[in-house]
Image (cartoon, grey):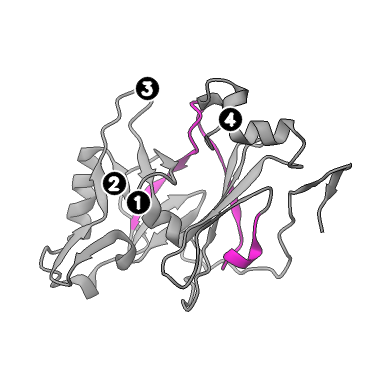
Amino acid sequence: GLALPALAQSKEFSFMSRLHMGSMLQNSVFSVFFANSDSESSEITFGAIKDMHMASELFWVDVESSNGFWEVVVDDIAIDGKPAGLCEKCRAVVDTGTSRLAGPSSFISQLRQALDVKPDCSNIHKLPSLGFVVAGRVLTLPPPDYTDRKGGRACDVSMMNLDIPPPTGPLLLLGIPFLQRYYTAYDVSKRRIGFAVAKHVGEKPQALFTLGGKAEQRSSAPVASFLAVRGKAGEPSS
């Protein structure tokens, strides 16, 4: 699959390792864009990071474990941009195969209480933002991203309990609600994940804020391709 090679039975079962060993990629990088409407298409790109899908600078975070998951440290949870002390130094897996946000049942219960989503949707327009503090940035989800509305009359949080015992767990899973808001890149050789605000059709993108509330400005420099050119090893494609 697309996990780090440590999770594969051998390098032959790791898709990215096979591409890299076959000199098909200059670097073992792939990136993921999740559409949030029928006006666009989801996309996975091997060997490149696409500027067209990013509305902010891409920043990199080292993978923290050797278990093969794309795992980073979440320093805390932020409610309306303020640290809430709900999850200090938690381990979180960025997971394209999970349809919701997930985490230990005790944590999800606390988070539900902090967000206070009313089942009848009566406070849907007053809900706070939900943020994950990663490497000094607050990766924020506005209420529509973390809530499910059923017919406009019933509301719930898009979260599920997932109790993974040690040593693998406990873990948070940042699934599709998170990945629709943030474009992600995965660097296998350097064991790191890149995050940027995703750019969606017909949507004004939100800013990427630091924990201190400062919006990060984006440079105009393009992001380089990582595609290898057959017969010209080490040279990026045009």
> Which label's residue is closer to the chain start, 3 or 1?
1
Residue 93 in the figure: left or right of residue 238: left
Q: Secondary structure at mark 3?
A: loop
Measure how far apart labels 3 and 4 are at the Cα level.
Answer: 23 Å
Tell me if mark 4 has few (under 14), some (14-19) or many (20+) residues whose alpha carbon lies within 10 angstroms of its own. some
Per the image, is 113 magenta? Answer: no
Which residue does the numbered mark 1 point to in the structure image?
Answer: 77
Q: Position of residue 23 (x, y in %)?
A: 77, 36
Bounds of the magenta span?
A: 49-78
Per the image, is 74 magenta? Answer: yes
Q: Position of residue 184 (x, y in %)?
A: 54, 52
Image quarter (top left, top right, bottom left or bottom right) of the C terminus: bottom right
Residue 20 in the figure: left or right of residue 42: right
Q: Farthest residue toward the left?
A: 120
Q: Which mark is residue 167?
A: 3
> Which label's residue is closer to the chain start, 4 or 2?
4
> Which label's residue is closer to the chain start, 3 or 2?
2
